[in-house]
Image: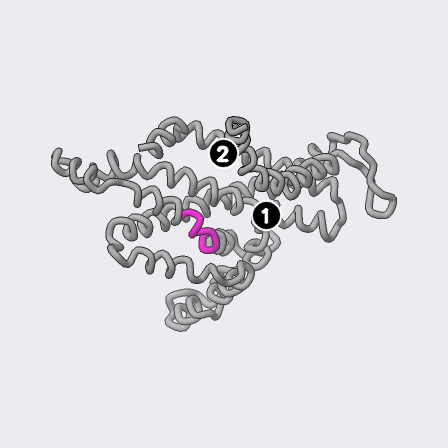
Amino acid sequence: MTGLKGRLTPYLLILPGGLWLTAFFAIPLIFMASVSLMTGNLIDGFTQTWHWQNYTDAIGTYGDKIVRSLWYGLLATAACIALAYPAAYWIAFKGGRHKSTWLFLLLLPFFVSFVLRTISWKLVLTDNGPVLGPLKSWGLLPDGFHVLDSGFAVVSGLTYNFLPFMILPIYVALERIDYRVIEAAYDLYAGRFEAFRRVVLPLSLPGVFAGVIMTFVPVTSDYVNASVLGGPGNTMIGNVIQSEYFTQSNYHTASALSFALMALLLAGIFAYARALGTKDVLEAAAR
């Protein structure tokens, strides 16, 4: 009896989480997959006809929005890495006993609603706001210069809103590095850059790997920043899916677009993992 109980314990521990994921992820996903192959409309109803043409029609119609979303996602993710790595490095190695304080200050703005933070970013970037207004009054920028309703504004908002998703995993990876390993590199006549390139960066790759996945997926799927900060020429695929679901009631088109985006993101993640070297990342994480 004891042996049976011991064998069942791991499964009993994961049972609540498994039931939760089944109820709120697996079942809705299966239902959405079924809807993506239906035909019909909201008035006459939808019928399961296994209409695979929904996918080709949706991708053919909104392919440019998908490409734009992937491009904005790549730019925002790259910007997050450029901003997050130095910040995480400084906190991990120079923060001293105030590391928790610095992390708290970084996360403090994110206790505010996502939408409110995006609207505040719009107020910052507005034509006569606290940034562009003084620059225009000083003659450093022309009066017609604007940032809102542009791809730059959307990518800036995405970078700002998802920056913690990159900082935290990189910080955790850097925090795990034994500083004696870096000192050993110095003892072997490595300079600061060489020690960083050969020791710190490889050991921090698991954090970068996790940060890219945690950032790229939600950034590419986001629609709030494009709605608030962008214009008609900056529509992302998330805006299209939101409109097809809640405005046009084209549930089959929205579902097909959702699965197409999911497939592209999964393919991108697997390609990224293969290029980075998943085995090397896992070996570095295990050290």
Q: Marks 1/2: CA distance?
A: 19 Å
Magenta segment main secondary structure? helix
Return the residue at label 2. Answer: 269
User: Looking at the rendering, which quadrant does residue 177 occupy?
Assistant: top left
Return the residue at label 1. Answer: 236
Relative to residue 189, is residue 142 drawn left or right? right
User: Looking at the rendering, which quadrant does residue 95 occupy?
Assistant: bottom left
The residue most toward the bottom is 137
Q: What range is drawn magenta here?
A: 159-166
Residue 191 in the image: state x and y as whole percent: 16, 39
Assign the C terminus to one quadrant of the image. Answer: top left
Residue 106 in the image: state x and y as whole percent: 38, 58
Which circle's residue, 1 or 2, is located before the other in the chain? Answer: 1
* 226 w.r.t. 175: above or below: below
Q: Nearer the viewer, residue 236 or 119?
A: 119
Residue 106 forms part of the magenta stretch: no
Residue drawn 41% across the image and 47% down it: 166
Residue drawn 61% across the image and 43% down it: 20
Residue 25 in the image: state x and y as whole percent: 63, 41
Residue 164 forms part of the magenta stretch: yes
Residue drawn 38% across the image and 41% down it: 207
Q: Nearer the viewer, residue 93 or 39?
A: 93
Relative to residue 168, is residue 36 drawn left or right? right
Assign the N terminus to one quadrant of the image. Answer: top right
Relative to residue 61, is residue 91 drawn left or right? left
Q: Amino acid at mark 2?
A: Ile
Residue 90 in the image: state x and y as whole percent: 28, 51
Q: Nearer the viewer, mark 1 or mark 2?
A: 2
Q: Amino acid at mark 1?
A: Met
Residue drawn 49% across the image and 56% down it: 157
